[in-house]
Every structure is written in structure tokens, then in C-alpha cells.
Image (spheres, rainbow, N blue to C red):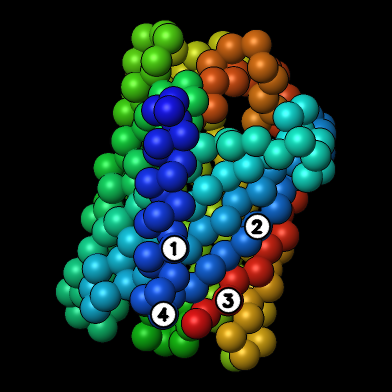
Amino acid sequence: MKPINKLTIAVCTTLLSTSALSASIDIRHEYKHSSEQHATRVKMNESINNLYFSGELKFKGKDGEFLEDLQNNGWEFDWGYRVKLNDNWTLIPGMPVEGRSSGMTYKPQLRVTYAFDNVEGLTLSGRYRYDMYQNNNTDDKRRHRLTGNLGYKYEKWSFGLEANYYKADDYELFKDKETDVEYNSTIRRTIGQWSPYVEFGYISYKDNGGFDIGDGSTTNNDYELRSRIGVSYSF
């Protein structure tokens, strides 16, 4: 059995065992408008007191077509621990691990979240993540990521804004530079145990001619719109 198949089976087992623990499941589909690529992700989440963990499987069409000739597009397992300092501040160290046919990516991270007293439902958070990509066929890569999030919850609605800044260690990310940016906005509504949502992202355009952490592709000199639609269900 190929190693990637063993990894896939291991992740599936994790997902199934997690689902028996009264967790939540999230199904999301995305479309990249310029590169015309579809992709789907299934994710399950669970938390025990302050400890949280999740597992996800990713799929895509052979040529990026919509649900056509689906193939494995990788997996990811994430775990972390919430340290509530007081009513406002929370520290969340974590360690996502992502696997693809091209290699593994280890992502140690630390998030800091602040909940405002004077505006109920408003939160601000920042995260540092260090992506360590171990490639099967090429040199290993290292990348720094800074993320800022602004979130607001009002009754059954949730709104989110996110900005990412990437800095590579001695290799090109975008426009002959070692840096790149990404922006996302999300709207979610809770209906009983269901939470449908939409997300729109502004991301660098990627083709198949080079390298980018996580999927073996590279960036050219343009950005594209990425639209996502999904739904989560809490058991």
C-alpha cells in the first residue's frame, strides 16, 4: 500500500472516531475564478475542555473540474490548547500538520485573541505561524505567516475579516519577491444546529509550473477571486 493511502486511511479513522464524540462537521467547496479550479474539503472538529483538535480531508477534480474524477488533494490534522488569561485575553498555541503527495508541512503557531468589553461580540486576534515544508522531491522550504482577524457576532449572524502576510526564507513567492498577501471575508448564519456560510478571498494566482508551500504550485503576477460556500453542523 502506498504511504499516501496509509495516511488517508489514518485520517479517515481519526475523523470517524472524532464524529462519535459529539463534535461538528464542516463541508466546504471553493472555486478560483481566474484559474477555474474547484476543490472540496470535509472537516471534523472536537474540543475537550480547553483542548481542541480537528481532522480534514481535501478533494478536487483531476483537472480542477467540478466534482469530476475526484482525487485525494491532501489531509490535515490540527490540535491546540486554549489558555484563558482573563475575560479579555486568550492564548492559543497549536500545531497543524498537513500531508500531500508532494510532502508534509508542519505548522507550529501561536494565536492571541482579545474580546472587547464595550462592544459585545467584537473580537480581535493575531497569529504567527511557521510553515516547515518537507518535500519528497525538492529542497525543503520554510515560510513565516502573520495573520490578523477581526470578528463580530450579532444574534445569529457572524462576520469575519482576515489578512495574511507571508514571508519566505530565501525563495520567491510572488512577483520576484519573497513576500505575498491574502485577504478573506466571511459571513455566517446560525440556524439551529446548522451554520451555512460564504467566504470571499483575494489570493495570488497560482499555476502548475513551480512551487508554493503545500501543493507544489507557484505564483505568477496576478491575483484572483476565490469564492467559498459551506455549511457546518453541530451534533
Q: Which residue is mark 4?
A: 22
Residue 163: x and y in percent read 53, 48
- Closer to the chain start, of discs 1 and 2, is 1
Left or right of 141 in this view: 178: right
Q: Which residue is mark 2?
A: 28
Q: Is residue 156 visible?
A: no
Could you say which disc has been placed on residue 233 in the image? 3
- Closer to the chain start, of discs 1 and 3, is 1
- At label 2, the amino acid type is Arg
The CA span between labels 4 and 2 is 20 Å
Which marked residue is nearer to the observer: mark 4 or mark 2?
4
Q: Which residue is mark 1?
A: 16
- At label 4, the amino acid type is Ser
Q: Secondary structure at mark 1?
A: helix
Left or right of 192 in this view: 15: left
Q: Is residue 22 above or below residue 218?
A: below
